[in-house]
Image: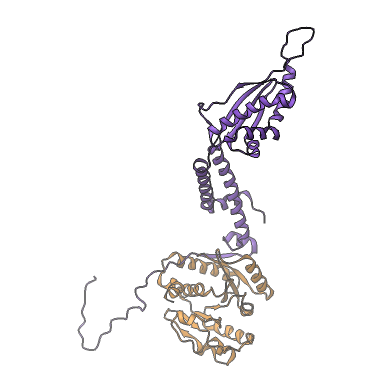
Chain colours: A purple, B orange
Amino acid sequence: MDLELREYILMAKKKFWIIASIVLIGSLLTGLASYLVVKPKYEASSTLFVNNKTLEVEGNAQSMDVNTSIMLANTYKEIVLNPSLLNKVVAQYPELSFTREQLAQMIKVNTISQTPVMTITAVHTDYEKAVHTVNAVSAVFKSELPQMLQVDNVSILNEARVEDSPIAVTPHPVIQIAISFVVLVMFSIGLVSLLEHLDDSIKDEKAVEREYGIPNLGLIPKIKPVKRKVRKESKPYQKAVGEPIHESLGQ
Amino acid sequence: MRALVNKALAAHYQPASPASEAFRSLRTNLHYYAQDKPLQSLAVTSVLPDESKSTICNLAISFAQEGGKVLLVDAVPRKPMLHSLFSISNEAGLAAILYNGLEWRNAVIDSDIPNLSVIPAGTVSKDAVASLPVNHIQHLLQEAKQQFQWILIDCPSAVSSADAQILSAHTDGVLLLLHQGKTKKAHTSQIIKQLNLVRANLIGTVIISE
């Protein structure tokens, strides 16, 4: 049976309290989880610069080859996350107590497009740790690069500093609440639709008439129980012969 | 039990209630129907098993309150209730009329409510599975129509027993009771089909809201 839009709205109105309670409680839970339960993660970044110098040609002074630097930066992006490099970080900085896999998860490398500038970012619930981690990776990368590629053209522009105020990156409570609100509304409407579809009991008289072609002759409302005071009707006043009749005015 | 009596006789004890009003309106609709086609005997059956008692009692009372003589017949042998609702004896009833040759007038008991008389279900022996003797029913209805303006027969649900079908085939009309929020559409369709099979005159439905 197809439900028209009007019937959807009527149905939503009837079961409104189900929808409202699901949405409210769900959003509330999401909000609580977002604000209270989930530990915020912080981000620390360092900036690196690729400075590729051209080969000396005919005694000209060395100048930076920007285009190559840019391409190198994009290449180096991949190298930072190379497992052997990360292993070296783990080895040289045991106080961080991260495994290689953990490091790989925490670290992100990006280049600023059209520039030979790279940023290394670490995300962790402990801001200090994020700072130390990102600086460690930057330092190791700079020092290991000559060994790996026989070039030494990376300089650290900017280290992450512990004194900087940490920025929480995740979670985003407002966004999460908004998303969960929308999802819950859709879900609860779907649930209510399903319940209505499955419910095949008689609901209203118009549907009955329409469906069976038989007129509806009446709708009997609920009979409210009332304490009955008198079961039998009072017996009529009976006089015996000779008894005087007492007339009394109405009470 | 008391609650059930209250409910079944609401038209008598709470005549001003919305329910009693609804019964009067149902009564009026039946009168309108009766203008076109003769309508004196009504079978009342519900889709849900054993749920027609209070409705048929109240309807009978509504008719009785108009002044016409009403005969209420309890045709639910397995769960006879009408005699308790009206505080009458169940000794001689419909069962005796149909199976023991009792003269029907001897089973009619006047209730406390003016113009309303009742034929209780009577007692049926457990192994009586014979189907209703049609000629006795027809005879009963024909003769009762001379004496009563309205004959209402409380039938069991057609889902559980074929009696409703048989009785419906012989009354002037059938009322089908549906309970809001409880009666299933599938059962309703099935019962309507069954009634149509015996060419019962299904006048209409009555919806009981709970």
The spot of residue A72 in percent (x, y) is 73, 23
Q: Quadrant of the N terminus of chain A?
A: bottom right
Viewer-closest of A21 and B36: A21
The spot of residue A89 in percent (x, y) is 64, 32
Question: Quick check: A235 above or below B62?
Answer: below
The spot of residue A116 in percent (x, y) is 69, 20
For the point 61% across and 87% down, the residue is B136
Q: Quadrant of the C terminus of chain A?
A: bottom left
- The furthest residue to the top: A59
Question: Quick check: A25 above or below B47?
Answer: above
- The furthest residue to the right: A58
Viewer-closest of B183 and A69: A69
Report if residue A43 is visible in the image. Answer: no
Number of disc labels: 0
Report if residue B178 is visible in the image. Answer: yes
The spot of residue B139 in percent (x, y) is 60, 86
On the image, which quarter does residue B75 sit in? bottom right
Viewer-closest of A101 and B142: A101
Viewer-closest of A213 and A131: A131
On the image, which quarter does residue B45 sit in? bottom right
For the point 47% across and 65% down, the residue is A222
